[in-house]
Amino acid sequence: MQTKQVIQTLCFQNKAALEEGKIDVSLITCAYNAEARLDAFFFYVEALRPSCRWEVVLIDNRSTDRTRAMMQDFARRVPFPVRVVRADQPGAGAARNEGMQHARGEVFCFTDDDCYVGPDLLDVGMRVFQDPGVGYAGGRILLYDPEDYPLTVNYQTVPESWGHDRLLRPGMIQGANMMFRASALRKVGGFDPDFGAGAPYTCEELEPVIRMQADGWIGRHVPEAVVQHHHGRKQADALKLNRNYQIGTGACYAKILCTLRPRWPTLRNWLGWQKYYMQIGKFSDVAMQWNGFFSYLFRRKAKG
């Protein structure tokens, strides 16, 4: 048998063993009508060569194109475990929760269908969580196409940590490149389905992070964990997207202040960043956050 065939046979035997065995890291991605993006996404996933035991969990969030069929074809042809799941409730938060229900890893690594993962992303994630105090982490998010507007990116090359007593800077944990200790994320209830793209509010990643901070978990920014974001947005999209993010941030803090005790650390965090925005002249961002804050409270009251 040729060497290539031997390697392929061994890879698929390993896949079968991992289907039933222990998994270190689950790479989780949700998609909605992503037919045009998935081939590029799959190319970079196939290039991963982690030394840890891993799997991929793909969530089809009510797509009406070939997204699910492409996911299933990918699962059949690759030599590592892939689970294809359908999420019937719209929104990234609900879809990520569905993925969590099927993921078996001790670490959850989330990315988006318009992102290209770095070859060592999963191994970097495993090293981060060897520290038993770390509950969540994020990494660098680079712009893939220089013609795209620099939105939802994170170029920071300096490591950083956050505890319950340190402000988490906005944009440091983003859905394009975020990792969680599975047990810690499950303990705080995962993601709120009212948050995330396709739901009433954005910023689904912020709410569980604040809860994990309150639980005493440490967060890390890890520059070695890299994805490239191919979002395709231009400058004209920036204003609307920023507005949605600011409204989502305000709604998130309203939800947390309604449900988490003690309230003061969360309130101090939010007001601290609002003060900073005021100092640098971003008055409209502050106004939009208060818009989201009261919008959430009215929505919560209406739902009873």
Image (cartoon, helix red, strand yellow):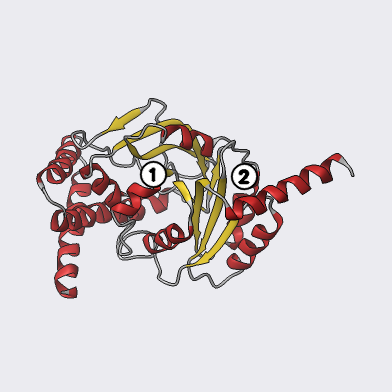
In this view, 208 is above or below 164? below
Instruction: Name the residue: 56% across, 35% down.
Output: 120
Instruction: Name the residue: 29% across, 41% down.
Output: 170
**SS at mark 1?**
strand
Q: Dot 1 surroundings within 10 Å: few (below 14), some, or many (20 or more)?
A: many
Can you give x and y, in whole percent of width and height, for residue 101 in the image?
43, 61
In this view, 169 is above or below 86? above
Query: Where does label 1 land, which residue?
Result: 181
In this view, 178 is above or below 131? below
Q: Please name the amino acid that badge 2 sits on.
A: Tyr
Can you give x and y, in whole percent of width and height, for residue 218 in the image?
29, 36
Residue furthest right in the image? 1
The disc at residue 214 is: none
Task: Give the side of residue 224 with respect to residue 164, left or right.
Answer: right
The earlier-in-sequence mark between 2 and 1 is 2
Query: Where does label 2 land, which residue?
Result: 44
Is residue 208 at least partly visible in the picture?
yes
